[in-house]
Image (spheres, rainbow, N blue to C red):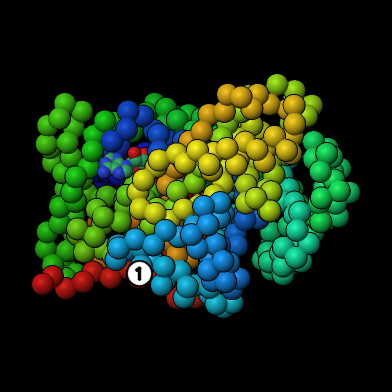
Amino acid sequence: MRVIVLGAGIVGTASAWFLQKAGHDVTVIDRQPGAAQETSFANGCQISVSHAEPWANPSAPLKLLKWLGREDAPLLFRLRPEWLQWRWGMAFLRECTPARTAHNIRQIIAIAEYSRQTLQAVRAETGIAYDCETRGILHFYTDEAEFQQSLPAAQLMRELGCPRETITPDEVIRIEPALAGIRHKIAGGDFTATDESGDIYQFTTGLAARCEQAGVQFRFNTTITRLLSEGSGAAARISGVEVIDEHGHHQRLHADSYVLALGSFSQPLAKAVGIDLLVYPGKGYSATYTVTDPQRAPRVSLTDDGHKLVISRLGNRLRVAGTAELNGYTRELNPVRCEAITQRTRELFPDACDYDHPQYWTGLRPLTPSNVPYIGRTPLGNLFLNTGHGTLGWTMGCGSGKAIADIVSGRRPDVDFAFTGMTRERDEPRMVSLPAKG
Ligand SMILES: Cc1cc2nc3c(=O)[nH]c(=O)nc-3n(C[C@H](O)[C@H](O)[C@H](O)COP(=O)(O)OP(=O)(O)OC[C@H]3O[C@@H](n4cnc5c(N)ncnc54)[C@H](O)[C@@H]3O)c2cc1C
């Protein structure tokens, strides 16, 4: 079968890898000159099953109100006259009940755990080098109340099979001695030994190269302008995709099936063929520093709860990422936010890095209100979804790629997850609607 994958981020590239392994003739289209140039470029680099708790949880509504309009807020809603943002916001509030939060954590753990195992298998098979560290993820808290509030979530994760162990401040320092300078500020922590970190860009570009060797065709510098549909009701399907190619020419490309993996940009293209996805961009920042003293820089991947930052060692670099702003599709760098990241990193690890020459970056997380991605079928028979991976696209990417390849090939994936448009042994399926054409 001929399959076109739309998007060459981690999700599209992993989909292409598993689709070609399943025997399909695969083409990947992306507007950038190479793979992983947008959100999969310079993120926090954590493979963190232990971060399965979504932003939408019972404590979120009050926190969001408190943060509204505060420039330094970890999660900032900038209200805009934009229907999608308001609909997304209302849906986010509906996901904050204890029951929805518990349901969403279950889904995220299932696909994230499956994905980590899938990533490990791909690593072993391909030998891709991506500054991978398998020393676990250490989450530390500098606020006693926040630490206490985190305990039920850690307990739930343990019950669901994620070994997120609650630990004392002394154990925090034993696991990562580079934090010794702030020992007196640490209220507690948790540690998930099975979690990992590694450079998403190196991995994704390495996998794209292996895909090409295996026969996948990549069409870079090619912008998708429209999905074309035909038929109605049960016979509705995608007939092609309209693009502007690398020479500026309009073209129509055709395949038997199409996988939509355009991250934050999936929503408008899907909407034009009647698929209503709640995916909204959540802008985040990262800073990358050159390590100047390897003994003083952390090796274990960290989460600084008080500042909502994640920190990953990538060989001789330190990547620090965080903050979230829901404010449309802008990727503009706000110098105040950039400086706040450097100030905090310098405070944690003085003398460990060259803080005078940081590399700042922003990316748009493709957020669903629940942080559960859309993976599966649509009412258009040959259009499949693999999008909306939000805060955890690196963690869930490989498993999502393997699962969608199974679904496109007519097989049930071997992970128990609420796939879009499919019935499931437990829980309800998630449907996307195809509104009547007016
Ligand atoms: C600051 C920050 C920190 C993060 N930290 C982590 C972390 O530590 N761990 C983790 O698991 N996740 C993390 N994430 C989330 C993760 O990076 C994303 O979920 C993931 O990269 C999304 O991958 P994707 O393939 O869906 O999207 P993308 O990587 O954005 O890929 C989509 C592709 O579609 C292409 N495209 C879009 N529109 C068009 C068009 N019209 N025509 C042609 N091509 C198009 C783009 O060029 C792009 O290559 C972080 C995100 C941010 C912003």
Q: Quadrant of ligand 1?
A: top left
x, y percentage for residue 118?
Answer: 55, 46
- 267 or 328: nearer the viewer: 328
Q: Residue at x 47, y 73 (%)?
A: 93
Q: Residues within 10 Å of mark 1 (few under 14, many from 20)?
A: few
- 81 or 320: nearer the viewer: 81
Can residue 277 be seen here? The reply is: no
* Quarter of the C terminus within the rendering: bottom left
x, y percentage for residue 72?
Answer: 56, 51
x, y percentage for residue 195?
Answer: 67, 47
View extreme (top): residue: 292
Q: Residue under label 1, please give it.
A: 87
Q: Does residue 231 appear to the left or right of 8 in the view shown? A: left
Q: Residue at x 15, y 57 (%)?
A: 229
- 346 or 414: nearer the viewer: 346
x, y percentage for residue 378?
Answer: 29, 63
Q: Does residue 206 appear to the left or right of 347 in the view shown? A: left
Please tell me in which quadrant of the rendered image residue 58 appears: bottom right
Question: Could you tell me which secondary element the residue under label 1 belongs to?
Answer: helix
Q: Residue at x 68, y 66 (%)?
A: 153
* Amino acid bearing label 1: Arg
Can residue 433 be seen here? The reply is: yes
- Find out if the beta carbon at label 1 lies less than 8 Å from the nearest ligand 1 atom: no
> Number of labelled discs?
1
View extreme (right): residue: 170
Q: Residue at x 12, y 37 (%)?
A: 251
Please tell me in which quadrant of the rendered image residue 423 appears: bottom left
